[in-house]
């Protein structure tokens, strides 16, 4: 069996009296695509925020490649190799498409303010490499012709793809996608899932994604977790999830 | 090395300006020359504030405080012992500062470093705040610095201030400083660090998720900005040759903020242009403060009337051009040629 990339150990996240996530136990192995699904307000994004260090869990631990990363700052977690996208697109709106991706390369360039300002030879070399890498990434998703346009001038679907590419620029080994197909029609969603599958094999990624619509991720996921009111009500392969009465109840309600 | 057409234009423009500054230095009368040099100092100051407000998205109003630190430290280092003796007549000066006299260049750098250090100390706690809270906190610290200077009689000569500073801020010195700061900002904003700053400005959360240490970027930006503000303060002190705590009130910060907003937050060339325009306008409009006889309206001197003009300008900018004159863009020769061809086509259209 491949190594375990990400593991959460009894993670509980409470906001005052509300338990947003209770006793979350997730295990993701290398090169898997794992889905986290559930109705609105089930605590999916909260779980993501705990994993990426945006929230500090009330109790429990997050382990990445067997390192306890609970309480690490978000930027350190990204440096360790977990990149993420956001549910509501968060591009750098004053920057161009290419610059957005280059921001993702910042840790890779790894130069201090003075080396960068003085454009030292070492800095220039890294900047040039970052530039080439960013262009390769943009080509990957068909955005290279828009490289010098403002990020916010792109149509919605392309903005979504840009966000994914920007996350890839941090050279992650694990990618967390928060509702990547939100607002897309079925055809676009299908194409996106195809892209996600392709990126996994090309960049040797492990992918953890949140999705609201179960049908969209059924085809792409190796494994799924279903949350409802913060509680993990089911996990397993897509086929068994689809038949699980608890999941059907959570999604459709019961008389 | 081969130059592109635009690079040649830029070099020619710089050379023309250099000649102009040289001629100005020899032929302008003392008052006009002083205003001309004040432009350079305002370029330094507005760029340092733009680094915070425009490029890193930190709304800071503490600039006058950092300028004061730079101005005082530099002045205390350059003043010869006899001059210090003359200034400190109310209370004697602390002995360890009495004997020190340094040349201008090391003094101004130490002044800038002192301002940067104070900026770092203040920035570390204050930068945990956001938006208006940050503005209020920085404003407060700036006032605290001023009060401390007023009360440190044996070090700063308190409210009497320091008089008769050597006039080191010559045309050459101030415009070199303005040029260096502009070049620094230009190179910084083209580097990965500048990109990180803009990313922090546009979306902190996303910047953090991209692996950028947001807090470190903010503190660095604040420290560098304080350093430049300190340099600007030192230049100002050695041009006016007198400094006192009342010079460094909130009004000074406001003047710089006015330039930054009018020129365009997040535009280096906007700040440079607005610095020159606003500094000259401040002097040209001075007649408004004096008694006027407009046949219908007679005033016997309304101090501050010229600021009304700037308030109106500010309102116009806020209503019609929220991002300021340059709107976050930079000056480029393409912009000039685009403007030129637009002008031409309009003329041609009229003929047809």
Image (cartoon, coloured by chain):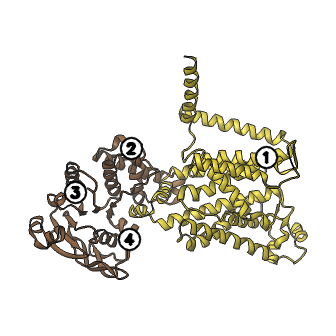
Q: Is mark 4 on a helix, strand or loop?
A: loop
Marks 1 and 4, how far apart in space? 52 Å
Marks 2 and 3, how far apart in space? 23 Å
Please determine if labels 2 and 3 lie on a single subunit.
yes
Marks 3 and 1, how far apart in space? 65 Å
Point out the image quarter for the C terminus of chain B: top right
Depth check, front residue: A20 or B12: A20
Is the Cβ of the residue at disc 4 closer than 8 Å to that at disc 2?
A: no
Task: Tally the numbered discs.
Answer: 4
Please determine if labels 3 and 1 lie on a single subunit.
no
Please determine if labels 1 and 4 lie on a single subunit.
no
State the residue position of label 1. B285
Please determine if labels 4 and 3 lie on a single subunit.
yes
Marks 4 and 3, how far apart in space? 25 Å
Q: Which mark is residue A54?
A: 4
Q: Position of residue B335 (x, y in %)?
A: 55, 36
Task: Determine whether, in the image, residue B169 is placed left or right of residue B141.
Answer: right
Callout 3: chain: A
Q: Dot 3: within a 10 Å radius of its alpha carbon, few (fewer than 14), some, or many (20 or more) residues?
A: some
Q: The brown chain is which one?
A: A
Q: Where is residue A31 in the image (x, y as percent from the top left)?
A: 20, 62
Task: Determine whether, in the image, residue A239 is placed left or right of residue B314.
Answer: left
Callout 4: chain: A
**Chain B colour as displayed:** yellow
Mark sitting earlier along the chain (2/3): 2
Q: Which mark is residue A147?
A: 2
Answer above or below: position of A215 versus B267: below
Point out the image quarter for the N terminus of chain B: top right
- Of badges 1 and 4, nearer the viewer stands 1
Marks 4 and 2, how far apart in space? 30 Å
Q: Position of residue A13 (x, y in %)?
A: 32, 78
């Amino acid at each position: 069996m491949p190594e375990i990339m990400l593991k959460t150990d009894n993670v509980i996240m409470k906001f005052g009296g509300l338990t947003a996530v209770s006793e979350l136990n997730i295990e993701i192995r290398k090169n898997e695509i794992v889905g986290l699904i559930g109705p609105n307000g089930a605590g999916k994004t909260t779980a993501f925020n705990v994993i990426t260090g945006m929230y500090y869990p009330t109790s429990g631990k997050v382990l990445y490649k067997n390192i306890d990363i609970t309480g690490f700052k978000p930027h350190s977690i990204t440096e360790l190799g977990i990149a993420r996208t956001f549910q509501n697109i968060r591009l750098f709106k004053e920057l161009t498409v290419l610059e957005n991706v280059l921001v993702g390369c910042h840790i890779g360039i790894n130069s201090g303010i003075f080396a960068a300002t003085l454009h030292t030879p070492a800095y220039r070399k890294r900047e040039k490499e970052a530039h080439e890498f960013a262009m390769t990434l943009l080509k990957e998703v068909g955005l290279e012709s828009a490289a010098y346009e403002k990020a916010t001038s792109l149509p919605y679907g392309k903005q979504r793809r840009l966000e994914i590419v920007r996350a890839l620029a941090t050279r992650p080994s694990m990618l967390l996608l928060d509702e990547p197909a939100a607002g897309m029609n079925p055809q676009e969603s299908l194409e996106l899932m195809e892209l996600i599958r392709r990126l996994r094999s090309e960049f040797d990624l492990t992918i953890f994604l949140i999705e609201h619509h179960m049908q969209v991720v059924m085809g792409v996921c190796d494994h799924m977790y279903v949350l409802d009111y913060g509680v993990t009500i089911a996990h397993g392969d897509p086929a068994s999830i689809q038949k699980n009465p608890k999941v059907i109840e959570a999604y459709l309600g019961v008389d | 090395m081969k130059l592109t057409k635009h690079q040649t234009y830029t070099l020619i423009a710089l050379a023309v300006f250099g000649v102009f500054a040289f001629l100005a230095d020899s032929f302008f009368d003392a008052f006009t020359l002083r205003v001309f040099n004040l432009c350079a100092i305002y370029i330094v100051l507005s760029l340092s504030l733009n680094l915070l407000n425009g490029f890193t998205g930190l709304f800071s109003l503490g600039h006058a405080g950092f300028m004061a630190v730079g101005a005082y430290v530099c002045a205390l280092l350059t003043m010869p012992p006899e001059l210090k003796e003359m200034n400190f007549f109310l209370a004697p000066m602390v002995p360890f500062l009495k004997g020190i006299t340094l040349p201008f260049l090391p003094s101004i750098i130490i002044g800038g470093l002192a301002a940067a250090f104070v900026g770092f100390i203040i920035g570390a706690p204050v930068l945990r705040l956001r938006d208006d809270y940050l503005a209020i906190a920085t404003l407060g610290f700036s006032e605290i610095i001023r009060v401390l200077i007023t009360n440190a009689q044996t070090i700063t000569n308190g409210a009497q201030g320091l008089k008769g500073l050597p006039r080191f801020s010559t045309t050459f010195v101030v415009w070199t400083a303005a040029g260096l700061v502009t070049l620094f900002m230009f190179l910084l904003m083209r580097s990965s660090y500048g990109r990180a700053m803009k990313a922090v400005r546009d979306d902190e959360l996303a910047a953090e998720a991209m692996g950028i240490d947001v807090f470190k970027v903010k503190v660095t930006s604040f420290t560098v900005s304080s350093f430049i503000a300190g340099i600007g303060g030192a230049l100002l002190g050695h041009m006016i040759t007198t400094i006192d705590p009342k010079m460094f009130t909130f009004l000074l910060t406001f003047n710089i903020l006015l330039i930054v907003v009018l020129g365009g937050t997040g535009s280096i060339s906007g700040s440079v242009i607005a610095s020159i325009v606003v500094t000259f306008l401040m002097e040209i409009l001075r007649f408004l403060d004096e008694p006027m006889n407009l046949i219908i309206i007679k005033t016997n001197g309304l101090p501050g009337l010229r600021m009304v003009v700037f308030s109106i300008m500010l309102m116009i900018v806020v209503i019609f051009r929220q991002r300021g004159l340059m709107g976050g863009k930079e000056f480029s020769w393409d912009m000039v040629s685009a403007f030129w061809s637009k002008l031409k086509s309009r003329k041609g259209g009229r003929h047809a």
